[in-house]
Image (cartoon, rainbow, N blue to C red):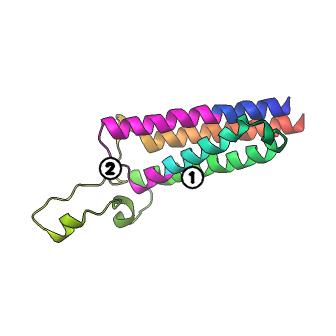
Amino acid sequence: MFEKNLHFYLKFLFISAIFILIGAGFIGYFYEIDACILCAIQRDIWLLIFLWSGFSFLKLVHKKIHMLMLIALLLICASFLTSFYHIGIEYGFWILPESLCSIKNIDYDALLNPDLNALSIPSCKQPFELIKGISLALINTILSGCLLLFGIITYIKNRES
């Protein structure tokens, strides 16, 4: 029973990661929005979650389900902490140097030619809001927090039985 619950959780993570990555790609493409540095890190973490939870589909690793689960929980924790840090910057709870948050791509032509307008890279302090007042980092924080809590409860509850 324990292993079935862990497999279900890992498959749920896999499906969640697919939706998150497709959603991020959709928003980036159709709204023509570049991700700030922290958004890119969050997407990379979700890509790792997608790849790691995908291992749960392989029959070879069923004996290592505990390790898969623990590493998946660490990745979800990293996603939660990164997105929590990101919303802290958005809402001004702490400060990140603007140079670390807004420079993703350097347009060398714009640097050398002052007549050209440089494309603005989104700042962490000016988030894209999917719904008024709710940024994508806040949605990621809530989702990651819920998945982390659900995963910890699943692991502890089924470990005891």
Q: Position of residue 96 (x, y in %)?
A: 41, 63
Res 28 quadrant in image: top left
Count of marks placed on residues: 2
Q: Which residue is mark 1?
A: 81
Residue at 35% x, 53% y is 125
Q: Residues within 10 Å of mark 1 (few under 14, many from 20)?
A: some
Q: Which residue is mark 2?
A: 126
Quick check: is 76 in the magenta stretch? no
Q: For this rendering, which residue is in front, 76 or 150?
A: 76
**First in sequence: mark 2 vs mark 1:** 1
Q: Is residue 92 visible?
A: no
Circle 2: residue type: Gln
Circle 1: residue type: Leu
For residue 146, side relative to residue 71 (left or right): left
Res 56 quadrant in image: top right
Furthest residue to the bottom? 112
Residue 155 lies, with reference to residue 86, above or below; the image says: above
Q: Residues within 10 Å of mark 2 (few under 14, many from 20)?
A: few
Question: Which quadrant, please, contains the N terminus?
Answer: top right
Identify the secondary structure beneath mark 1: helix
Furthest residue to the left? 115
Quick check: is 19 in the magenta stretch? yes
